[in-house]
Amino acid sequence: MTDNPRPPTIESLASVVAELAEQIFLSLTTIGTALTRVWDEATANRRSTPRSTDLARLREPIAHELEQVGDLFDGAGVVIADGALADRPRFLEWWQVHSAHGPQRLNPELNPLSEYFYDYTQMDWYVIPRDERRRWVHGPYIDFACTDQYVCTFAVPVTTAPGQFLGIAGADVPVGAMQEILLPRFRASGPALVLVNDEGRVLLATDPGLPPGSRTGRVGWTGTGVPIDALPWSLCRLEGTTTY
């Protein structure tokens, strides 16, 4: 007769979330390292500020990371610091994978005079890595610019050796992709669980009444939740809810 395995603790499940985040950040660090290398080589060869065309070399390492992580990323790339390039005031080298067409480059409107201007310099996923020089995750939010689904944008700052901020390496991670990885583990714990951001907004939950993006103020909390290492997230037990 064998003993039944103990259900995972909320602390061990918080570690699972942290490990998934580390996997994502590791991929972004690889992309950021590629940007630094391209930047340093272009600067050394011409002894002048790099141009947007120099960043075309990033397509291969970005596409490689997209291939490695599969459906975990909806898109990934680099977002360049305002005014850092010689020829473009703002620039993204950002790629998405479409099964029918392979990697496709994203081309948002970066002209501030356009009514569709995409001002990434006001986005939290850009501002916090720029100003505080630390990695960050923003969301969940509906990505109206690309996929119309709930995503979280992960970002890491990219700098030169002397400390110049070049921009961020980032990825859009669909909440649905995180659900596929994490929810089976959460359900095995028994009690209803919810993963929330620092605003109390739901990323994912075992309670079907708490969809992504909803707020948790109306439900009962057990304890204060377990913070996720290096992320503005917490994993919490819920009272009076139903798992699925």
Image (cartoon, rainbow, N blue to C red):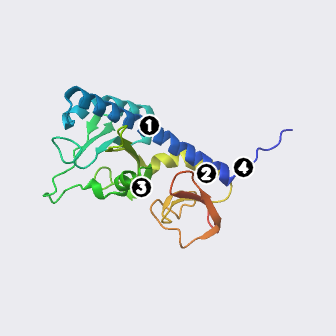
For disc 4, the neighbor class at 10 Å (few under 14, some 14 to 19, many from 20) is few
Q: Residues under labels 4 and 3: Cα distance?
A: 31 Å
Marker count (numbered): 4
Labels 2 and 3 touching (C-beta < 8 A): no
Amino acid type shown at disc 2: Ala
Q: Residue at x 44, y 52 (%)?
A: 137
Disc 4: which residue: 7
Label 1 amino acid? Ser
Please state which amino acid type lies under the numbered disc 4: Pro
Q: Nearer the viewer, mark 4 or mark 1?
A: 1
Please name the residue that numbered disc 1 is placed on.
Answer: 27
State the quadrant of the N terminus: top right
Mark linked to residue 225: none
Element marked by disc 1: helix
Marks 4/2: CA–CA distance: 14 Å
The dot on residue 138 is 3
User: Nearer the observer, disc 4 or disc 3?
Assistant: 3
Give the percent coordinates (x, y) of residue 177. Answer: 46, 46
- Earlier sequence position, callout 2 versus callout 3: 2
Secondary structure type for disc 4: loop
Dots 2, 1 in contact, CB < 8 A? no
Q: State the separation of the CA atoms marked 3 and 1.
A: 17 Å
Q: Residue furthest bottom?
A: 218
Give the labeled residue for mark 2.
Answer: 14
